Image (cartoon, helix red, strand yellow):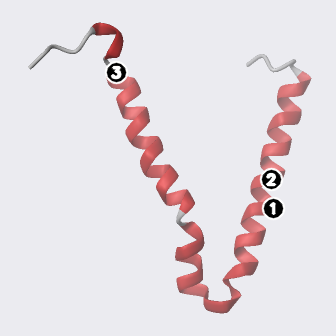
Amino acid sequence: MQPIPENRKVSPGLAFFLVHSTQVGTGVLGFQRIISQHAGYDGWMSVILAGAFTHILMYMMYKMLGTVDGDL
């Protein structure tokens, strides 16, 4: 078995971030299915509201970043 070159290795912090983002991303992408199972035919309203709130939050984040010229 060949050793892995240094430039191909992933740091422990990055490995944690990769695993965490994969798990959270899977949960976020599956929330429509979970809502529709519990709410039945009324679930479409909550999905639209959740999407609208997400868009509003992202808009506010972009506006705040615009006031500081994108510098965090």
Chain-order first, disc 1 or disc 3: 3
Q: Is residue 58 above or below residue 46?
A: above
Distance from the alpha carbon under mark 3 to that under mark 2: 33 Å
Chain-order first, disc 3 or disc 2: 3
Determine which residue is flagged by label 3. 10
Is 5 placed left or right of 63 in the picture?
A: left
Give the structural element (helix, strand or loop) at label 3: loop
Is 41 placed left or right of 57 in the picture?
A: left
Residues tagged 2 and 1 counted as in contact (Cβ below 8 A): yes
Q: Is residue 38 above or below residue 68?
A: below
Q: Nearer the viewer, mark 3 or mark 2?
A: 3
Instruction: Identify which amino acid the numbered label 1 is placed on.
Output: Ala
Depth check: give the residue in front, 46 or 29: 29
Res 67 label: none
Determine which residue is flagged by label 2. 55
Q: Is residue 5 above or below residue 64?
A: above
Q: Nearer the viewer, mark 1 or mark 3?
A: 3
Where is residue 31? Give x, y as percent: 56, 67
Q: Residue at x 53, y 84 (%)?
A: 37
Instruction: Identify which amino acid the numbered label 3 is placed on.
Output: Val
Where is residue 66? Give x, y as percent: 89, 26
Is 60 placed left or right of 54 in the picture?
A: right
* Crowd band around label 2 with a 10 angstrom C-alpha radius: few (<14), some (14–19), many (20+): few
Residue projecting furthest to the bottom:
41
Instruction: Identify which amino acid the numbered label 2 is placed on.
Output: His
